[in-house]
Amino acid sequence: MKLRLFGLLSALLLSMTTMGQTSIYDLQKPFGFCTRSSRTADIPFDITGGGCYAYPVSGVSDGDVITLTSNGDDMRSEIEKAIKKYKVIILDGSHGIFNVSSTISSNGISGKTILGINDACLCTTWYATQEIIDALNAAGVPSMSTSGGGGTLSNGTQVKEQAEFNTRQIIINITGDENEDYRKSGIFYFKSCNNMIIRNLKFVGPGSIDVGGADLVSFYGTKNCWVDHCEFSDGMDGNFDITQKSDFNTVSWCTFSYSDHSYMHQNTNLIGSSDSEATGYLNTTFAFNHWGEGCRARMPMARVGKIHMLNNYYTCVNGNNCINPRKSSEFLVEGNYFDTGVKKCYSQTGASAVTWSDSNFITEKSQSKPSSFGGTVTVPYTYEVAEASVVPTEVSTYAGSTLYLQAEDPSAITAAKTGTPGRDNVYYNLAGQRVSKNARGILIVNGKLIMK
């Protein structure tokens, strides 16, 4: 039976087109706030990225496109240089993961597309080892204060919070890294950038740990960007944060999770870094995203901006304060699905207005329906709300890096699925698309075919 199924799998892979099937709800083009330049008026913004955001690339001269594959070494410098020089940067995962030793920083760039094909994954080289985790547990770090009681590290740095102070000192003691270079273990940091498209990439971090370190991806003063069909796992501080006058961004069909590598601070998405954020910014659309295993809070937590939460899926068991409006924010929440085990789907503090639609669905009936307040929150673009009942199937099947799987080498695709750090126990269907572990039919997990 297994041989027969493997033959069927190989035949299907060989006949695949370069892009897997997509949901009928997936527009496959920029939408939401990234296509606007006003939080209230319908003023369009032409978001083009590097001139193309699909694969194969068309309409862009060859001299503006570069394709990178992994050489097995640190790829940080090569990727950073490519982003500066080219309009369209293709990261091809057919030769393995892209190791990144520290955050790739880009300042003031515009008109770029960063696109993954063949299961492309960027992974930090530093991670929280079991030795470090055991030492943190032995010191009682999980029960320490996260709001005071800090001290001075052996390198002379003042740290305000007790848990962070002890965590950082223990890591210094174990690693000897007095400069704390490990705290730079992120993937992308975009400052004052605009008109960018990031699609179909996996980002794997070192594990969440309370050291005030890097996010997997960070937007700082960055505007009119579309982040689509990406996967974020095990960010050190956050998975994907948007702060400091960033504006008009859309996050769609992405997944957020944490594995056993994560220790504390599984706070996945922060919009606005403090209550002193400048008003009028941080307007953001989150549509058809999945907050899953290990996520504890900030899905997202947001200040100041107008945030549109559309048809997102929550399976984060014990997730607390998932949607978390904070100071002076406005939230429009429609068609989202909160599955069994989500502890608390909503909490707000100091928001200006929240419109909580009847189209949302909360499985745990012990939770009361959140109340709308303030004026009715609207957004300056047209859209359709899918029925919440279809969200679990559509999002679990199609969210994440499910696009642009090439079939020239089926064995390489299988190897990529089984050989990426932090990617164990991930389920795929026979089309090579990531699906929920609750999906039915013939599935691939850890390189094996199973029937469910």
Image: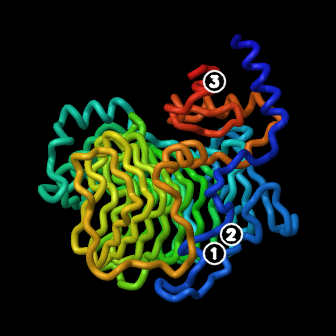
Quadrant for the N terminus, please: top right
- Which residue is located at x 32 percent, y 72 percent? 354
Rendered location of residue 111, percent (x, y) = 69, 74
- Which residue is located at x 54 percent, y 68 percent? 250
Circles 3 and 1: CB distance less than 8 Å? no
Rendered location of residue 7, percent (x, y) = 79, 20
Q: How many marks?
A: 3
Residue at numbered disc 3: 447
Circles 2 and 1: CB distance less than 8 Å? yes
Say if residue 69 shows up in the picture.
Answer: no
- Residues at marks 2 and 1, CA–CA distance in whole angstroms: 7 Å
Counting residues from the start of the chain, the first of labels 3 and 1 encountered is 1
Q: Nearer the viewer, mark 3 or mark 2?
A: 3
Helix, strand or loop at label 1? It is strand
Which quadrant of the figure has residue 128?
A: top left
Residue at numbered disc 2: 112
Q: Residue 195: which disc?
A: 1
Q: Is residue 141 left or right of residue 84?
A: left
Rendered location of residue 309, percent (x, y) = 44, 64
Observer-nearest of 422 and 19: 19
- Which residue is located at x 15 percent, y 42 percent? 143
Observer-nearest of 62 and 227: 227
Quadrant for the C terminus, please: top right
Observer-nearest of 258 and 67: 258
Q: Amino acid at mark 1?
A: Asn
Counting residues from the start of the chain, the first of labels 3 and 2 encountered is 2
Q: Is residue 425 left or right of residue 414?
A: left
Q: Give the farthest residue toward the top.
A: 1
Which quadrant of the figure has residue 81?
A: bottom right
- Residues at marks 3 and 2, CA–CA distance in whole angstroms: 35 Å
